[in-house]
Amino acid sequence: MTVIRWGILGCGRIARKFASDLQYVKDAELIAVASRQQSTADAFAKEFPAKYRHDSYEALAENPEVDVIYIASPHSHHHEHTLMCLERKKAVLCEKALALNSKQVKEMIDKARKEKIFLMEALWTKFLPHYQKLQELLAEGRLGDIRSMLVNFGFIPQPPVPARLLDPALGGGTMLDIGIYNVFITLSVMGRPDEIEATMTPASAGIDEQCAVLFKYKNGALAQLFSSFTSNLATEADINGSKSRIRLTTRFYEPTTTIEFYPDRPDSRQIIPVPKEPGTGYQYEARHVGECLRKGLTESPIMTHGDSLLLMETLDRVRKAAGIVYKGVDG
């Protein structure tokens, strides 16, 4: 497999970012796109040239020239679309959140393993240079024992507001859209929490427009996480250890962030340089998927199935504590 031939399922905003960043991936080609409307697929393929423009997702999954499909549909459809692609023996990179709950995630993983087909959650931050550098610093013990984390992510959606942000049937609310980044990075640094407390401010539709979460650990460590659609927050991550402190500045989940290292006092700031490439940053995960497929892997060694399951199980615990319910899924 020399050139990895990509198909994109769903032609929204995030799909455009991914398609644009494929130009920075060696031996990768966008060969097919799919939308429920032919005109949408045609417009997308005009902007990002693709040989095939499908008016159904099934047609994309059945295209014999497609090696792997990037699923960029709303959260509520990830489960259905992933199973459909795996059934047709297509490798899948599915946008985060992988599904709406851990039951769905387990079904997706089980299907991938049964079919012996590659499946990975597109949690792009895990492949970015600054995140890799953070993991390196933690592994070296530069921070000592982690005592606390403060993580926030918030913005005020501007019109026209995408339906998926506010519709509970689509997995709307802050938790799956942006709060997932807060949970992800905290799990990466501190691991599975022993206790979770959470509260949320419900919007008129019932989804969480604000959510405050507290992770508690038996060793006394704490993590505070806050997500909001009602405030434009700094969107930073503050990691505090017994030896030193790290601050990931705006926006901590993107490659544009800066790593601030504080070895001593609050005024002892050092900037740790991190390489940056052109583009938005989706090329890193796409490049990794290509490497996995060339090696014949069915699971990423970096973003494992276990990582996705732990993330969704933790999100389930947060939702239960906060009273966040997805209609038609949670009952």
Image (cartoon, rainbow, N blue to C red):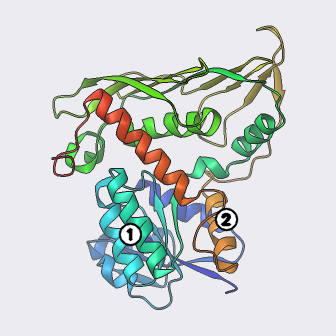
> In the rendered structure, which amino acid carries the disc numbered 2?
His
Question: Residue 86 appears at what percent x and percent y?
Answer: 41, 77
Residue 177 or residue 314, whichever sits in front: 314
Q: Which residue is under mark 2?
A: 288
Name the N-terminal-most of marks 1 and 2.
1
Disc 1 crowd, CA 10 A, few/some/many (<14, 14-19, 20+):
many
How far apart are the two marked residues, 1 and 2, measured between alpha carbons?
19 Å
Residue contact between numbered discs 1 and 2, judged by CB atoms under 8 Å: no
> Please, is residue 152 above or below residue 41 in the view?
above
> In the rendered structure, which amino acid carries the disc numbered 1?
Thr
Disc 2 crowd, CA 10 A, few/some/many (<14, 14-19, 20+):
some
Q: Which residue is under mark 1?
A: 82
Residue name at image x 74 percent, y 41 percent: 135
Question: Residue 45 appears at what percent x and percent y?
Answer: 44, 74
Which quadrant of the figure has residue 104? bottom left
Question: Residue 195 appears at what percent x and percent y?
Answer: 45, 26
